[in-house]
Image (tube, helix red, strand yellow):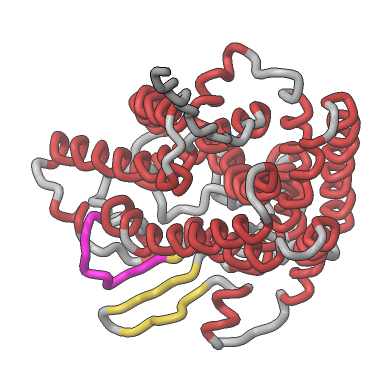
Amino acid sequence: MPAIAEPVVEPVVTKRVRIESIDVVRGVIMILMALDHVRDFFGNSGFNPTDPATTTIALFFTRWITHFCAPVFFLLTGAGAYLSLGKKTKRELAQFLFTRGLWLIFLELTVTRCLGWQFNFDYHLTLLLVLWALGWSMIVLSALVYLPASVVTAVGVVMIATHNLLDSVQSSNPLWTILHSPGFVVNSPGRIIFVTYALIPWIGVTAAGYGLGQIYSWPSLRRKAFLLPLGIGLTAAFVVLRAINVYGDPLPWSTQRSAAFTVLSFLNTAKYPPSLLYLLMTLGPAMLFLWAVDAGTPRWLRPALIIGKVPMFYYLLHIPLIHLLAIVVCYARYGQVHWMFESPNLGQFPITKPPGWEYSLPIIYLVWAVVVITLYPLCRWFAELKRRRNDAWLSYF
């Protein structure tokens, strides 16, 4: 008898089912993030836009709305880690979080520093920013995942709620600077290393997000019934604690020259490090946003959904693109761009701008729109690539 060929069985590729509401919220905050970075390059970065004594209402809220970006991103990173347990063992998840954390720290110290913010390789100035803190948060979470999710959640909540008790601790120890008190870890002639994102509260947000991930195994109705009161409760807690003006933020609010500017003072909470009130102010509305889009993404938010599927890809592209646009505009205006490649000092971060460089808010918003529209087709291409392929390296972008 002729041999009967064995049927070829293709290996089944298991891919994690993505939660659309998480992706769309993540996409929105990534879009907002670009607004803040455009303002860094094209606005007056030496001016504090949230100081009620000197800012304008439009400038204040241009900066304030971007306060939501980092807390929501760290929270959803933790939630995404929990959701990965659907296709990974705890050991596999821990290994992934550890290696990806190291990868993010590497990107912070190389790609985003040299090819994004500064366009130089001299390392006279190094800022430890969001990828630094996110990387360490993932490394810590890689150890915490061996604990019950309820314990990880409790650890995160306690860190968020109590870390402001440490505000009075004054120390020049570099480890303390890294953990809780943003500042210099190296400050010598020719070499500056400055910690912007201290670790303790951001690790707490990521751990709390790991606990939040549990609710995405629930039916939608039950999940929405949890998110709505949670969002209202966190937001109300912010209002009450901020009104009491005793604990939760190192900068008390005060009466200003008008009711509108008093509201600005009330909303002006500390990001470095993120205070309890800063996190309540941002994560409460974030829960309400997750609740609002749980049943589906509105048509007008579909582009944000695409960007939210590839947040790291978008992040790594948007800073160099903004910097390149600044170089083009600078050359057209001044005929030289050498200062765009110099190491900035901290008073003029991220670039040493010539007199008269700063642009008005309408121009900043226009550049922001150009950046997002330019990046959207690239994000759509990369999202489709990730959908079709299951290469291990793609999970690191």
Q: Residue 225, relative to residue 81: is it above or below?
A: above
Q: Is residue 274 left or right of residue 152?
A: left
Residue drawn at the location 47% of the way across and 36% of the way down: 310
Res 123 → quadrant? bottom left
Residue drawn at the location 38% of the way across and 45% of the way down: 316
Res 204 → quadrant? bottom right
What secondary structure characterizes most of the magenta part? loop
Q: How many marks?
A: 0
* Image spot of residue 373 (x, y percent): 38, 23
Res 84 → quadrant? top right
Q: Specify the farthest residue to the left.
A: 335
Residue drawn at the location 77% of the way across and 46% of the way down: 212
Q: Quadrant of the C terminus?
A: top left
Residue drawn at the location 42% of the way across and 41% of the way down: 391
Q: Quadrant of the N terminus?
A: top left
Residue 373 seen by the camera: no
* Image spot of residue 104 (x, y percent): 45, 58
In magenta, the rendered stretch is 119-127
Q: In this view, does 354 lie to the left or right of 128?
A: left
In the image, 94 versus 53, the foreground residue is 94
Residue 165 seen by the camera: yes
> Would residue 367 be counted in the magenta stretch?
no
Q: Specify the farthest residue to the top.
A: 299
In the image, 332 versus 155, the foreground residue is 155
* Image spot of residue 231 (x, y percent): 83, 38
In the image, 360 versus 165, the foreground residue is 165
> Would residue 121 be counted in the magenta stretch?
yes
* Image spot of residue 73 (x, y percent): 60, 46
